[in-house]
Image: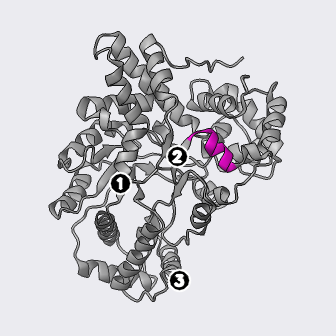
């Protein structure tokens, strides 16, 4: 029998009341994820649980490698059953890791399975879940409906034609599935060959020649307009640190010309060009009234051997330790001085930066929009009980938790909507303890409304997307 009871993580009567009466039935607004829009457009049916659970999940791969599992059972050519078997043998070793909670939440919520996953139960669970997934009631769109998801914002490269998003919209699917502008490759000048290959793709996507920096910005703007016409209302940037060096337009033109000639540029020029592009992207977002998101602090692809053999996003990333408070302040201030600072969400990966970001957003709240500057939810290595709790505590102490736009999945899996439930239970547990301890009023119309706002309503108001 699973430990995931109806009162899981709810350690007081007020917490249980807040969750069951106010949080549990709220729709989901998943404003940042990495699921495939093509899978939604095709209404894909998965042939087995490994396809939806293990293909592409670097969280699980990291745990399996730590448990001594050979790579062929993670990203290799082992059969799907063998991969699931290896994962089932790893699950008992994940006690106190969030994967243990997520695994059993997803089994219970999606498939009604109330058993612990381990080698003894692996075959039964694999067969039952796989059989269910092959039916139309568990297709991608059905999984989204089951989770009560109203909005999904995927993560998309500016050169993407967004054909899958068009097909989803034309199909009349009731959940809104919108693209998110992720222009990281447009400033990937540490690798000139890779950058130039992307610029060549941009030429084709924008249907124009890119002969100089002015053409480059014009092509990006053309794609930005294309995304806006397709319903995009937010951008996202994955940054190890924030770039806010002094630069001139002449610098940007010179550096772009060097790059297009295939030359390596100096470290100083790399920082200048990245600073120029980050500023230009932010200006475009402000002009369109978009929300800009910055995920800051990941050191990516640390293991050269595996990066060369497996590629990026395969589980060899970690928390970085850059100090970026000053450049972040400069970046935001430059935009604010021009009155071109868009609504902004800042996410950190190093927990040392919690209070820094929670106070940084207060520097640029300007009274135009409630919660204009957001301290984002616990992300990646911090989207677990301790990380979510500390993010909530920092925002509560130094900002307005009541204006928080809440949780997201940041996931490639259609089973990950249980992370919203996980967050909601943690939120209600924290607020319930406050009520029990007499630290906030036992006024459920007040606190319950706050819970519902954080779960869903704030996101609806903040992103301005009709649902």
The image quadrant of residue 394 is: top left
How many other residues sit within 10 Å of disc 3, few (<14), some (14-19) or many (≥20)? few
- Name the spot of residue 23 as percent of width and height, x first: 47, 28
Task: State how far apart marks 3 and 2 are (Cα).
Answer: 34 Å
> Could you tell whether 158 is left or right of 5 in the image?
left
Task: State how far apart marks 2 and 1 are (Cα).
Answer: 33 Å
Judge depth for marks 3 and 2 and give the one in front.
2
Judge depth for marks 2 and 1 and give the one in front.
2
Q: Main secondary structure of the magenta part?
A: helix
The numbered mark, 3 or 1, whose residue comes first in the sequence reads 3
**Element at badge 1?**
loop
The numbered mark, 3 or 2, whose residue comes first in the sequence reads 2
The region drawn magenta spans: 140-148
Q: Decide: marks 2, 1 in contact (CB < 8 A)?
A: no
What colour scheme was applied to this rendering of the protein?
one colour
How many other residues sit within 10 Å of disc 2, few (<14), some (14-19) or many (≥20)? some
**Element at badge 2?**
strand
> Could you tell whether 181 is left or right of 355 in the image?
right
- Name the spot of residue 368 as percent of width and height, x first: 20, 51
What residue is shown with label 2? 150
> Could you tell whether 110 is left or right of 421 in the image?
right
* Figure check: 155 above or below 121: below
What residue is shown with label 1? 241
What residue is shown with label 3? 204
The numbered mark, 2 or 1, whose residue comes first in the sequence reads 2
């Amino acid at each position: 029998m699973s430990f995931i009871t109806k009162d899981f993580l709810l350690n007081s009567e007020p917490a249980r009341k807040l969750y069951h009466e106010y949080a549990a039935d709220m729709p989901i607004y998943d404003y940042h994820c990495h699921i495939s829009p093509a899978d939604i457009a095709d209404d894909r049916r998965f042939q087995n649980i490994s396809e939806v659970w293990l293909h592409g999940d670097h969280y699980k791969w990291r745990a399996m490698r730590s448990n001594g599992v050979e790579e062929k059972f993670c990203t290799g050519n082992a059969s799907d059953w063998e991969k699931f078997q290896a994962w089932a043998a790893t699950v008992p070793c994940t006690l106190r890791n969030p994967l243990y909670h997520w695994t059993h939440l997803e089994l219970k919520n999606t498939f009604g399975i109330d058993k612990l996953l381990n080698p003894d139960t692996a075959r039964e669970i694999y067969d039952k879940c796989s059989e269910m997934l092959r039916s139309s009631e568990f297709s991608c769109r059905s999984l989204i409906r089951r989770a009560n998801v109203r909005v999904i914002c995927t993560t998309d490269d500016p050169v993407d034609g967004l054909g899958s998003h068009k097909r989803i919209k034309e199909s009349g699917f009731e959940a809104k599935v919108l693209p998110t502008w992720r222009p990281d490759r447009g400033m990937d000048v540490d690798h000139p060959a890779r950058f130039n290959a992307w610029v060549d793709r941009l030429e084709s996507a924008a249907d124009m020649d890119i002969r100089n920096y002015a053409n480059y910005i014009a092509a990006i703007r053309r794609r930005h307009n294309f995304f806006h016409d397709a319903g995009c209302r937010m951008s996202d940037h994955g940054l190890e640190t924030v770039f806010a060096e002094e630069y001139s337009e002449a610098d940007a033109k010179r550096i772009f010309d060097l790059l297009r000639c295939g030359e390596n540029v100096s470290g100083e020029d790399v920082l200048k060009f990245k600073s120029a592009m980050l500023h230009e992207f932010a200006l475009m977002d402000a002009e369109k009234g978009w929300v800009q998101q910055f995920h800051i602090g990941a050191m990516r692809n640390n293991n050269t051997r595996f990066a060369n053999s497996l590629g990026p996003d395969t589980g060899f990333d970690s928390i970085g330790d850059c100090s970026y408070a000053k450049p972040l302040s400069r970046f935001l201030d430059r935009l604010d001085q021009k009155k071109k600072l868009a609504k902004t969400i800042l996410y950190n990966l190093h927990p040392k930066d919690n209070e820094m970001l929670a106070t940084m957003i207060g520097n640029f709240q300007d009274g135009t929009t409630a919660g204009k500057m957001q301290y984002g939810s616990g992300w990646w290595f911090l989207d677990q009980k301790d990380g979510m709790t500390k993010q909530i505590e920092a925002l509560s102490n130094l900002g307005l938790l009541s204006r928080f736009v809440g949780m997201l999945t940041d996931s490639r899996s259609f089973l990950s909507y249980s992370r919203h439930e996980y967050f909601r239970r943690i939120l209600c547990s924290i607020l319930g303890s406050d009520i029990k301890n007499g630290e906030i009023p036992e006024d459920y119309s007040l606190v319950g409304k706050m819970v519902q706002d954080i779960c869903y309503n704030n996101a609806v108001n903040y992103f301005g997307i009709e649902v």
